[in-house]
Image (spheres, rainbow, N blue to C red):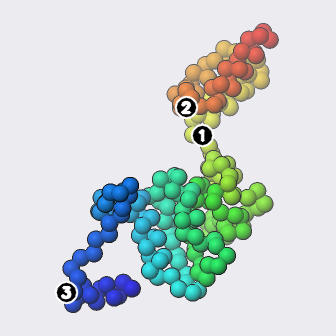
Amino acid sequence: MFEYFITLQANDFISDIDIILVQNSIDISFSHLSEGQKQLLTILGLKELLITANSLFLLDEPDTYLHPVWQRDFISKLNILEANSKSNFIITTHSPQTLSNLHEQDVLIMRQGDIYSLDANGLFGRDSNAILEEVMGADDRSPQAQKYIDQFNQNITRKELTNALVNLEKTKEYLSEKDPFFSVADMRITRLKRKM
């Protein structure tokens, strides 16, 4: 298909190709789209133009520029898991959102050149934080925040109210005040004060 367009352009039958996206009855030129929109349209377009029976598509982190909601829906947009698909896709990703839309039998993990299959915990529909921690080995909090949370928990266990309050204040430097940790911490401090 692309060879056909190149031939037409080389013979001056066409000078340029402009892709227009119609969104909410508004024409948007490809050049005015976000990087994520460009990435998604390019991948979907290439798939439609190049797909044949027994095609193999190799996509290296195609979800990099996509909004997290689009990352979650990326696999379903490609329709690569349909039973009647005669093509194969090998996709690399670091996105827990993309992984949450796959079943464990469709995923292999590569670490330092070794390839592993997933255990039975599953991925499909899982929370992104759980995938980050359990599958990708990433902590859900920064090391600094976790250090003060751990110290706070130790202080509460040892009934060290003053130290617990100090570590709670230090934790506020590393976490949003809306973090659920603070609700739990407040309850634990209240309980500790009642026992003293």
Q: How many marks?
A: 3
Q: Are the residues tagged 1 and 2 within 8 Å (C-beta)?
A: yes
Residue linked to disc 3: 12
Q: Nearer the viewer, residue 12 or 170?
A: 12
Kindly give the residue lying farthest to the front in the view shown: 25
For residue 5, which quarter of the picture? bottom left
**Label 3: few (<14), some or many (≥20) within 10 Å?**
few
Q: Is residue 45 left or right of residue 196?
A: left
- The residue that mark 2 highlights is 175
Q: Quadrant of the C terminus?
A: top right
Picture residue at 62% right of the left edge, 43% below the top: 140
The mark that comes first in sequence, 3 or 1, is: 3
- Decide if residue 173 is in sight here: yes
In the image, which disc is placed on residue 194?
none
Q: Is residue 25 left or right of residue 164?
A: left
Location of residue 89 in the rendering, given as x and y in whole percent from the top left corner: 58, 75
Label 2 residue SS: loop
Q: Earlier in the sequence, mark 3 or mark 2?
A: 3
Mark 2, other Cα within 10 Å: few <14 / some 14–19 / many ≥20: some
